Image: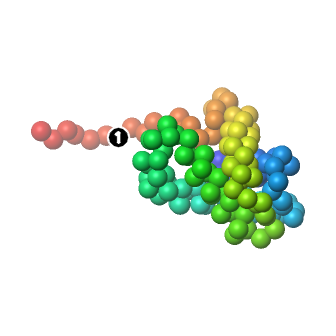
Amino acid sequence: MKPFLIRWFCTTIAVAVAVKLTGMQAEGVGALIGTALFLGIINAFIRPVLLLLSLPFILITLGFFILVVNALMLWFAGGIVPGFHVGGFWNAFFGSIIVSIVSWALSAVFKDSDGKYQILTHHGQIKQVQGKVIE
């Protein structure tokens, strides 16, 4: 639960920074918190499907189209979350870049359970499996 809350906090701060630097608007802290939660949910469930469907475009553009998918997710959040408004596609595009950079930088600040500084998306645990090989 703690890693989820830390990611949520980092995303909330990142969205707040993006609102300050771009033309997006948030009517309060609640809108920022709600947007960060909604972005986490759609990035977990909808974004992988969109990335899979847009794989040919991603390959042709050498990964640049991923930025477009991220912008669409942020633009979608602006249309759904009350109190959070995105002015247009380009605001969402530059805002999604800012959210990505700031959330990555903030997540790098937090320590892992063993006291080491690690990016939170890195899973350093290796699970051992016991069993027999059937030939």
Locate residue 110, reporting x and y percent: 72, 37
Residue placed most toward the observer, 11 or 4: 11
Can residue 109 be seen? yes
Horizontally, residue 89 falls left or right of residue 127, namely right
Q: Secondary structure at mark 1?
A: loop
Is residue 27 positioned above or below 17 on the image? below
The residue drawn where x is 78% and y is 60% is 87
Q: Position of residue 99 (x, y in %)?
A: 72, 46
Please identify the quarter of the rendering in which residue 78 is found.
bottom right
Disc 1 designates what residue?
129
**Apparent side of residue 23 relative to residue 130 in the rendered image (left or right):** right
Q: Could you say which is closer to the camera, residue 17 or residue 108? A: 17
**Residue 116 picture quarter:** top right
Residue 5 appearing in the image: no
Color style of the picture? rainbow
Q: Is residue 112 above or below residue 80?
A: above
The image shows residue 27 at horizontal and vertical percentages of 87, 64
Residue at 67% in and 30% down? 117
| Badge 1 amino acid | Val
Q: Nearer the viewer, residue 1 or 22?
A: 22
